[in-house]
Image (cartoon, helix red, strand yellow):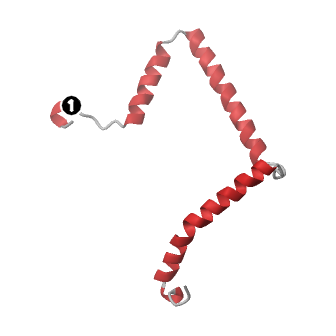
């Protein structure tokens, strides 16, 4: 769409946000309050889950340990060639790898 067709510079996310806001505002106040309470509850649950997962001792459950090992292997295997390429391109290290 060009200027002649009246195109604006809104992104898809902004358009979806505007539509959702308009639809939410069209609801009656009781339904709005219900959805607001549900959103607050979900937010609190999410915060509690995050706090539980990021504080306290590390989990020793085999499932959690396996997730860590898998992530670590994937990270190392995917970034190692990048680091070696950077080291080879750097003059002080180009002879060592």
Picture quadrant where residue 69 is located = bottom right
> Looking at the rendering, in which quadrant would you find the N terminus?
top left
State the residue at coordinates (49%, 76%). Answer: 85
Nearest the eye: 44 or 74: 74
Find residue 96 and report its image quarter.
bottom right
Extreme-bottom residue of the structure: 95
Q: Give the structural element (helix, strand or loop) at label 1.
A: loop
Point out the image quarter for the C terminus.
bottom right
In this picture, is 18 found above or below 90? above
Residue 72 percent location from the top left of the image: 67, 61
Count of marks placed on residues: 1
The residue lying at 49 percent from left, 82 percent from top is 88
Q: Which percent across, then down, holds residue 47?
A: 71, 37
User: In the picture shown, does residue 25 fall above or below 56?
Assistant: above
**In the image: residue 67, left or right of residue 3:** right
Q: Is residue 82 above or below residue 45?
A: below
Against 37, residue 2 (above or below) is: below
Residue at image location 63% in from the left, 25% down from the top: 39
Residue 9: quarter of image? top left
User: Residue at label 1?
Assistant: 6
Q: Residue 54 location in percent, x, y?
A: 75, 48
> Crowding near pointer 1: few (<14 within 10 Å), some, many (20+)?
few
Left or right, residue 68 beside residue 58: left
């Amino acid at each position: 769409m060009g200027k002649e067709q009246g195109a604006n510079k809104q992104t898809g996310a902004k358009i979806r946000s505007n539509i959702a806001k308009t639809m939410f505002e069209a609801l009656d106040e009781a339904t709005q309050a219900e959805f607001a309470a549900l959103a607050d509850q979900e937010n609190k649950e999410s915060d509690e889950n995050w706090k539980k997962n990021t504080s306290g001792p590390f989990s020793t459950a085999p499932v959690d340990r396996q997730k860590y090992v898998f992530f670590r292997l994937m990270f190392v295997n995917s970034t190692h060639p990048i680091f070696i390429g950077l080291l080879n391109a750097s003059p002080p290290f180009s002879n060592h790898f």
